[in-house]
Image: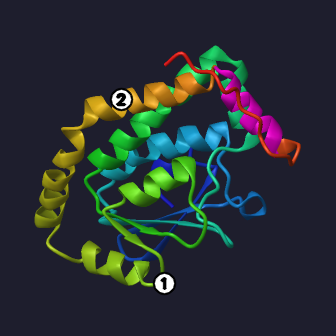
Amino acid sequence: MSNRYAAYTKLKLDYPSKRVLRLTFDRPETYNSVDAETHTQLTNIWRDINDDPDVNAVIVTGAGKAFSAGGDFELIKSILDNPVARMSTWKEAKDLVYNVINCNKPIISAINGVAVGAGLVVGILADISICGKIAIETAEELSSGAQSAIRWTKYALNNWLRVNGPLFDTSTALEILGFTGAEAREGLASHLEKRKPVFPQDCPL
């Protein structure tokens, strides 16, 4: 494994085929939930993949029976209770989307189970999303294809996403704003207490 990826200790990385990098969410005991450190690494790794001359295609998948269950409870609690963590998570959530979009290598997601939160972001933003076992074959074909044509095609198609950047920025800001209110706290509490949530019925919006 290249030293380029030495810092990404929370993600399992390997090469299932020549010039194909596989990124695996590797916490099967929690259905590959994402803690704060994993969230940061998942945000940043796409820049290194973009600059890696030895990688032509990427596969993203999950260990065990799930793709990724999204943020774990500790990450959610930190967003609820810590304004700095809340802002940091918002910035990372935005950067994650833009870094995936701007990564010049084709990304194939092998969605092998539940996909939520940051995991779902990567799963559906991938250039090809597959719910099956042919992800490696697809990655191999892309990694051995005409690289400039493939990467230019990805860049052009992703301009449809870039042009909607202001809408996306607003949606992530409102999502994080929701963590400051009573609904998010009640949602987490009801889940931990295994009961039906009782949300406030009034809203000034």
The answer for how far apart the CA atoms under marks 2 and 1 are is 34 Å
Which callout, 2 or 1, points to the residue nearer the camera? Answer: 2
Q: Position of residue 82 (x, y in %)?
A: 69, 18
Q: Position of residue 152 (x, y in %)?
A: 12, 57
Magenta residues, start to end: 181-191
Q: Position of residue 78 (x, y in %)?
A: 71, 27
Instruction: Pick whichever, 38 or 158, lies toward us.
Output: 158
Q: Residue furthest right?
A: 193
Q: Earlier in the sequence, mark 2 or mark 1?
A: 1
Amino acid type at mark 2 = Asp
Please tell me which residue is depicted at 68% across the width and 42% down the height of the picture. 35
Instruction: State the count of labels.
Output: 2
Q: Is residue 1 left or right of residue 183?
A: left
Instruction: Pick whichever, 52 or 122, lies toward us.
Output: 122
**What secondary structure is marked by label 1?**
loop
Instruction: Pick whichever, 36 or 194, lies toward us.
Output: 194
**Residue ID for mark 1:** 133
The answer to whether the residue labelled 2 contacts the one labelled 1, judged by CB atoms less than 8 Å apart, is no
Q: Residues within 10 Å of mark 1 (few under 14, many from 20)?
A: few
Amino acid type at mark 1 = Lys
Please tell me which residue is depicted at 33% across the width and 62% down the height of the picture. 54
Residue 58 visible? yes
Please tell me which residue is depicted at 61% across the width and 58% down the height of the picture. 68
Residue 47 visible? no
Q: Is residue 74 magenta?
A: no
**Residue ID for mark 2:** 169
Q: Is residue 189 magenta?
A: yes
Here the colouring is rainbow
